[in-house]
Image (cartoon, grey):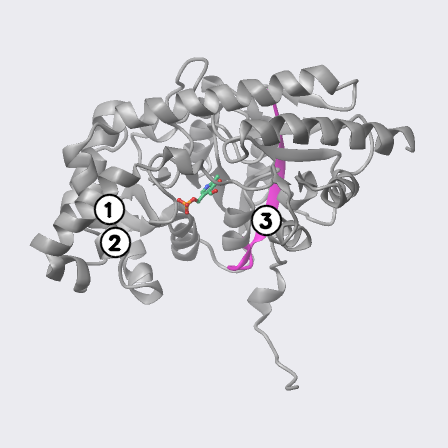
Amino acid sequence: MFDYTFSERMSALQPSAIREILKATAGKDVIAFSAGNPSPASFPAAAMAEIAADIFRDNYAGALQYGITEGLPSLREQTFDRLKAKFSIGREFDRLIITSGGQQAIELATKVLVNEGDTVICEDPSFIGALNAIRSYRPNLVGVPMDEEGIDVAKVEEILKTDKRVRMIYVIPTFQNPSGGVMSLARRKALLELAERYNVMILEDNPYYELRFAGEHIPTIKSMDDKGRVIYAGSYSKIISPGMRIGFCVAPEEIINKMVVAKQVSDVHTNQFFMMLVSEYLARYDLDAHIKGICDLYGKKCDLMYSELSKYNNGYFDVRKPEGGLFMWLTMPKGNGAELAKLCAARGVAVVPGSAFLADESKISPCIRLNYSLPSDEDIVRGIKILCDTAAEYLSGK
Ligand SMILES: Cc1ncc(COP(=O)(O)O)c(C=O)c1O
């Protein structure tokens, strides 16, 4: 075989631990708590079938032809109007671009802002997809721990004071992946104030914001941004369907203009047919009512997982009950989440070790992440029992 040589930028990226777990359990009848997938029951398939047929009958050229990089104008307008009306997101100076998932918004934002060797601050742990997108631009990635109120802003300020190369702070303030946590309003304000004072950008990644099934909404950081310090990444993945790959980004016009150039190089534009599909869906159906149905479904699944855990969790895990999103975060009093994940995989239950989400993946984490949106109720009941039995054995040997 040829001895292939790869770019240095790829050396910073490891294969996703989640994918590795999926590989280890492939072909087996596993209970998957490891995915980040929405429930297929939440996909509006009948509405999509009807709209798709109409598009190909009435406007096939629109769907099959090249489009513009910024995205389908009607979808941009509908998305921006909705964000403004419902969440006060977007000022005079802001513009919106449709991206291939929220993932691309993160990648493009990093591409246009961050030079090799610059510093990017993130929550520790954080979303692997974003961390890898950021890592591919070879910055100094610095993870800052969180508590019940979110990222430690005093620590963020310490870094900002001493490191003059900080360009961006990447956060998932609502229903954080993987911790499920929500940043308090006070921390959101403090973070924005720091970004203004130290002249850095905040990348607010918010794909789970509307999946709240308990507690009170907290304003986004972007809604408080009157100076153009926040880039907002959103997505239709978790509220309509992830397979469509439709996300969006709201940011000051100058930044969006740069992102448009970067996106031209990357994929020219987002999938034209699916942009039309979402645009028509928004015109014909009540998205808010659809989201309410999803929240009811996930709220019930979360309750079930939490109550099963309460039955069998004999001090093995500290569990934080989420108020929304897709994930439950479990912390053991000692041990290594990766070792527990391996034992669970051998017994047909897939979970993700906490270390996979750390800025420094070589560190050990006593945590694991569970997903409750995808598994069936039966699998939740069966899987949690297996998980707790496995944890009992694992921890007794520690
Ligand atoms: C925190 C976070 N941000 C962004 C994304 C990207 O989602 P998408 O590209 O499907 O919009 C995900 C997906 O799981 C996520 O968990």
User: Is label 1 in a helix, a strand or a loop?
Assistant: helix
Q: Residue furthest left?
A: 58
209 on left or right of 96: right
Question: Residue 44 lies in what quarter of the image?
Answer: top left
Q: Which residue is mark 3?
A: 141
Which label's residue is closer to the chain start, 1 or 3? 3
Label 2 and label 3: CA atoms lie apart by 26 Å
User: Within 10 angstroms of label 1, few (less than 14), some, or many (20 or more) residues?
Assistant: some
Query: Which amino acid is tagged 3?
Result: Leu
- Residue 349 percent coordinates (x, y): 68, 39
User: Is label 2 in a helix, a strand or a loop?
Assistant: helix
Label 1 and label 2: CA atoms lie apart by 6 Å
Chain part drawn in magenta: 135-148
Marks 2 and 1: in contact by CB < 8 Å? yes
**Any magenta on residue 144?**
yes
Asked if residue 312 is positioned above or below residue 14 in the image, the reply reads above
1 on left or right of 250: right
Q: Which residue is mark 2?
A: 257
Report the quarter where the N terminus lies: bottom right
User: Within 10 angstroms of label 2, few (less than 14), some, or many (20 or more) residues?
Assistant: some
Residue at the (27%, 48%) spot, across then down: 98
Marks 3 and 2: in contact by CB < 8 Å? no
User: Within 10 angstroms of label 3, few (less than 14), some, or many (20 or more) residues?
Assistant: many
Label 1 and label 3: CA atoms lie apart by 26 Å
Residue at the (82%, 30%) spot, across then down: 334
Q: Which residue is mark 1?
A: 253
Viewer-nearest residue: 11 or 45 = 45
Q: Residue furthest right?
A: 397
